[in-house]
């Protein structure tokens, strides 16, 4: 499912089905497919019955999350992870040969919306956000394993307090909203042990963590090294009246490769490219092994 609040700004640098990508160009999933010579993964719900998922599909739903209750806070009719897994299950049933599943890569990039949209979670000081989100995610990764998945790339959450929307809404005295970064860090701290435990108990599985938090920190500390000059503002114009972090129609910066963020919460194509490029060969970003090794195992 695509962007629930489509704007002509989205996909300005990538004119294929522009409304389904919450950035100016390619997503991380697109760059993974491109790196390994595969077609870009089409949205599963856009496929006709006669079309095959032999080379992959995208089950993501914009604005949704891990927890079922997140649906009550979203802008559109999104599909939570449980529903996405049901779609995957239905497509697996229709495969004539499921041998390829064990060689396929399952990419999970979730958690941000669960923390972003549910304000009750944000301000509950007694709640351990890591445990609250990581345990449900672990259960659902096991479900994907039971359906035949063996190779998993799981992303953690970027520094939530450093996004343009967080900064504009809370106006921190420091560069970022540390309260939100702490929430992200709570969740992120659980993931390495969780993935290690899953790999040790699920025979033949491989779980790799994509540390996008680290990549953003690296870019924030030395943006010029990555060809980026603006790490605090969105490239597109945001609708300040509605107070939502998405692009208004048409108003987009001309130097998009200079920005870390396209709208007020989503990275630009260049940031997506940086994250996957680092993941491919850098075992400090994708760990315990890099993406190239994961795919070849």
Image (spheres, rainbow, N blue to C red):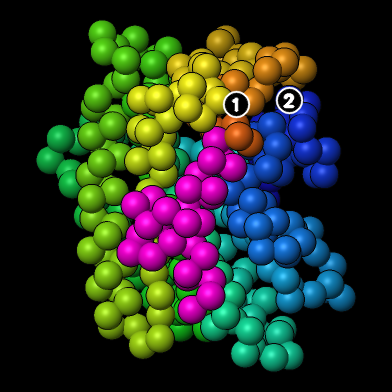
Res 33 → quadrant: bottom right
Q: Which residues are magenta?
A: 271-297
Does 270 sit above or below residue 20? Answer: above
Q: Is residue 264 visible?
A: no
Query: Which callout, 1 or 2, points to the residue nearer the camera?
Result: 1
- The x and y percentages for residue 85 are 54, 68
- The x and y percentages for residue 269 are 63, 36
Q: Secondary structure at mark 1?
A: loop
- Tell me which residue sits at (59%, 75%) in the image: 104
- The x and y percentages for residue 274 are 53, 41
**Are the residues flagged by discs 1 and 2 in contact, CB closer than 8 Å?**
yes
Q: Which residue is mark 1?
A: 262
Q: Earlier in the sequence, mark 1 or mark 2?
A: 2
Q: Which residue is mark 2?
A: 9
Q: How crowded is the residue under tag 2: few (<14 C-alpha within 10 Å), some, or many (20+)?
A: many
Res 171 → quadrant: top left
Residue 185 included in the magenta stretch of the image: no
Q: Is residue 258 visible?
A: yes
Is 130 or 16 nearer to us in this picture? 16
- Tell me which residue sits at (74%, 76%) in the image: 54
């Amino acid at each position: 499912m695509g962007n629930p609040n489509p704007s002509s700004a989205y996909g300005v640098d990538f004119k294929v089905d522009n409304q389904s990508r919450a950035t100016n160009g390619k997503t991380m999933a697109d760059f993974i497919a491109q790196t390994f010579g595969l077609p870009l993964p089409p949205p599963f719900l856009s496929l006709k019955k006669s079309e095959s998922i032999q080379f992959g599909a995208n089950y993501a739903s914009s604005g949704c999350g891990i927890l079922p209750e997140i649906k009550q806070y979203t802008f559109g009719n999104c599909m939570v992870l449980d529903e996405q897994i049901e779609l995957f299950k239905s497509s697996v049933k229709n495969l004539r040969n499921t041998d390829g599943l064990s060689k396929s890569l399952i990419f999970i990039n979730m958690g941000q919306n669960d923390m972003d949209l549910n304000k009750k979670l944000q301000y509950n000081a007694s709640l351990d956000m890591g445990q609250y989100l990581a345990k449900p995610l672990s259960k659902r990764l096991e479900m994907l394993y039971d359906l035949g998945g063996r190779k998993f790339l799981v992303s953690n959450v970027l520094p939530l307090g450093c996004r343009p929307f967080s900064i504009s809404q809370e106006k921190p005295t420091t560069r970022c909203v540390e309260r939100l970064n702490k929430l992200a860090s709570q969740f992120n701290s659980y993931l390495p042990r969780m993935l290690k435990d899953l790999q040790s108990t699920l025979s033949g599985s491989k779980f790799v963590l994509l540390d996008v938090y680290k990549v953003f920190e690296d870019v924030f500390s030395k943006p010029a090294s990555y060809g980026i000059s603006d790490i605090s503002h969105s490239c597109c114009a945001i609708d300040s009246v509605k107070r939502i972090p998405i692009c208004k129609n048409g108003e987009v910066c001309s130097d998009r490769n200079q920005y870390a963020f396209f709208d007020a919460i989503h990275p630009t194509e260049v940031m997506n490219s940086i994250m996957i490029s680092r993941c491919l060969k850098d075992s400090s970003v994708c760990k315990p092994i890099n993406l190239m090794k994961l795919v070849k195992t």
